[in-house]
Image (cartoon, rainbow, N blue to C red):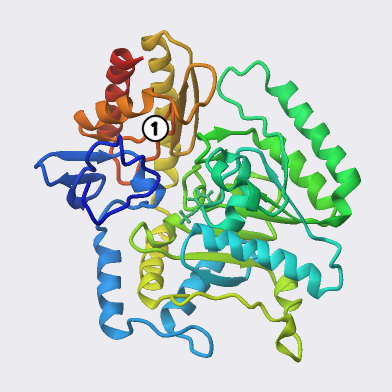
Amino acid sequence: MHKNIWPPFTQTATAPEPLHIKSAKGAVLQGLDGKNYLDCISSWWVNVHGHCHPKIAESIAKQASQLDHVLFAGCTHDSALFLAKSLCTLLPASLSRVFYSDNGSTAVEVALKMALQYFQNIGMPERRKILAFQGGYHGDTVGAMSVGAESGFFEPFRGIFFPVHHLPYPATWNDDDAVEAKETGALEALKQYLDTHGATTAAFIVEPLVQGASGMRFCRPEFLNKVLKLVREQEILLVFDEVMTGFGRLGSLFAFEQLDVTPDIICLAKGLTGGFLPLSVTVCGEKIYEAFQGDSFDKAFAHGHSYTANPIACAAGVASLEIFSARPYDAYWQAVEVFHKEQLARLQKAVGNPLKTRARGTIAALTIGEEENYSTTLNPLLKKAFLERGLLIRPLGNVIYLMPPYCTTFAQLEEAYWGIEAVLLSCV
Ligand SMILES: *Cc1c(COP(=O)(O)O)cnc(C)c1O
């Protein structure tokens, strides 16, 4: 390990030397070792169009020589305005106010603070509670950790979280016999919670349809629709954390397109700049925005970051959305889902061991064995074996998943699946 570096989410005492990457193009990373690595996880889910996409690179270069940065309070600039406008044309009309921040965690902090202050501002300060799912992950800052407290990553900080009620989450997979029973139990628990606390709850935050970091845990749309309906009946604000699911991951531009309910607030980050630069947005509707208007500063939203709406990051976002707005991916996303399903079925047969498989849109996942286990000793072996085969696949504990950039060819995907098969046969 380099003596001046402390990498994220890494036990540096036992981790192997990090893979040194010198360049990237499309779905492929070029290592300093002269080898190529297929980026099967979009570099922690941020890359969407492939690495070093020339349109985005060009937009960044142009912006950097025109306006590097300017504060976003009292000043404004074209790239933030263009990005907000293009984003809102892709979102439903009810999501029309864009608040910028820097990353997924801050987008979540903004959403929570917005929801709490909204009720404060409209004279309903009793609405103070936050509801979330067990296993939800919303980022690593303290507010985001509080709502994600049951994701399994934050034990050392348990005492400092604000109280959040965590509902049971009926994670499911292909051929899951128990799904109905789990869903019924979860809905019962929700109803009980709402009976007692519905009127004092401000917001419900959810990763729609797939919980990413806690192990690519899927739920069924029909279940989530029921939950959202019950929660909305109580006038609780619905916050969708689409930091991971946004920008096509689940086969539609946003996950909410596959649900009956649109959120009151949506958080977007990772894919927003195409994977080039850190930037996020928290988007709400006019009803919430209106509640922050007043004659004095008291009702204003006192939140901001030094780099709020950085022009270069926004320029990357504008270029990325231009690529999306030509809608080049609809057929690709569908075809990838079909391919994932075929390949997972093939793997299940080839490996023999029990694998819990699931796929939606561009995400495919399998759990080795019965339970998700983040700290399994299998994990470092898997990572190493994949790298040796030229595959950047970073299982979450014993959950192997693929989340490729949308330039990945089917030949490349097939290569990834052959690699997974070989690794499962040798390691498990
Ligand atoms: C990654 C992620 C976050 C946090 O985003 P950062 O940019 O890493 O802070 C929040 N929510 C979800 C669903 C995520 O996947």
Which residue is at a point 62% across and 49% down the rendered structure image? Answer: 256
Q: Position of residue 385 (x, y in %)?
A: 25, 26
Q: Would residue 96 appear left or right of 2 to someone viewing this image?
A: right
Residue 112: percent from left, percent from top: 66, 61
Q: Residue at x 37, y 49 (%)?
A: 8
Residue occupying the far left of the picture? 34
The answer to whether one can see residue 255 in this image is yes
The x, y position of residue 214, in whole percent, is 53, 37
| 152 or 421, nearer to the observer | 152
Place of residue 101 in the rendered image (x, y in percent of width and height, measured from the top left): 50, 69
- Where residue 98 sits, quadrant-wise, is bottom right
Horizontal relation, residue 224 to residue 1: left or right:
right
Please tell me whether residue 317 is drawn above or below residue 219 in the rendered image: below
The image quadrant that residue 288 belongs to is: bottom right
To which quarter of the image does residue 346 belong?
Answer: top left
Q: Is residue 415 visible?
A: no
SS class, disc 1: loop
Residue drawn where x is 81% and y is 34% of the image: 189
For badge 1, the amino acid type reads Pro
